[in-house]
Amino acid sequence: MTKNINIDNNYKIKIVQNPNEINEYVIDVSELNIKNIIKEKSIIFKIDFSNIQNIKYKKILRKLLKLKKRLYKKNVFIGKEDGTKILIAYILNYSENDTKQNDFILAINAIFYKTKADMYSYIYDTVCDYLDSFFYGKNLCDFKNNRCGEKRKTNSPSSVGCCHHYKNKLLGPLIPHNLVLCEHLKQDYTCGAKCIGCKLFTCDYLEKKGIKFRIKDILLLDVFFNPLQKYFIKTMVFTPKEKIIKRLLLL
Ligand code: SF4
Ligand code: SF4
């Protein structure tokens, strides 16, 4: 039985078991030729995971994003109506437990947002959800009496982990006990800012446990942002989502 993967913006991808189930002209995402494709009136893609090596994902996705922008400008319709949704691609040799393939599909979802702001917001939320779910219910920071594993090793007066910053950022480290709680920390010790920079941060304590997040290992961040944007994603800590997205859109 044919299954669909519903993605955002009313699009869908059809999972097929056999290439014979595809009865129309499709363009293989691993062989994109922008010049030829923009001559078509409408197009549907084929994603065959048996033909795409993981290391090629980034290149293909960037090319697809570039192509989508060109097709919109040329009024080439992507997909076709299929029930209440628009079918944009057929997918072959897909394994639903393959996290790399699923990351590729999340990136396809990102590409088909209409505006850059919406696309960035989707990527941001998806990555934050991933990072939250990684930590959820595991107490990886080994909190005991509101002090995490890292802070228990030191004389630091701080509790509630790393949600502190220096009041005066210029003189801060020189003034003892100048640490203040982050203004975004809620009473239940959750973050009210949805700050991706903070979520990506891992201290020595976590790194010794083998937990480290690198932007280049997170496909959605690696594909769609340039080096300067990646720098800000990593370093804009203590900052709410809206402010970060606004900055990324300027770069
Ligand atoms: S990341 Fe490190 S410093 Fe921050 S709460 Fe966890 S153990 Fe503590
Ligand atoms: S913005 Fe960062 S420091 Fe502030 S509460 Fe959220 S995670 Fe903690």
Image (cartoon, rainbow, N blue to C red):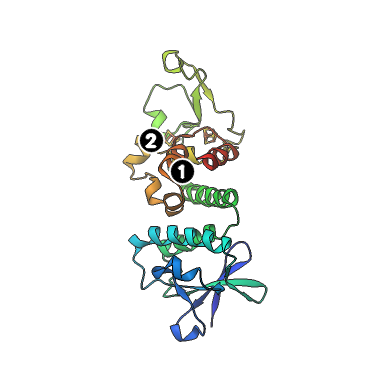
**For mark 2, does the 10 Å Cα neighbourhood hold few (<14), some (14 to 19), or many (20 or more) residues?**
few
**Disc 2 residue type (three-letter):** Cys
Q: Is residue 91 above or below residue 135?
A: below
What residue is disc 2 on? 203
What residue is disc 1 on? 139
Q: Secondary structure at mark 1?
A: loop
**Disc 1 residue type (three-letter):** Asn
Whether ligand 1 has any atom under 8 Å from the Cβ at mark 2 is answered as yes
Residue 72 on image: x %, y %: 57, 62
Tell me if residue 128 can be seen: yes
Q: Residue furthest top?
A: 175
Residue in the foreground of this view, choosing between 6 and 203: 6
Residue 81 on image: x %, y %: 63, 75
Identity of the residue drawn at 43% across and 43% down: 140
Q: Is residue 56 above or below residue 250?
A: below
N-terminal label among 2 and 1: 1
Spatial CA span between label 2 and label 1:
15 Å
Residue in the foreground of this view, choosing between 139 and 43: 43
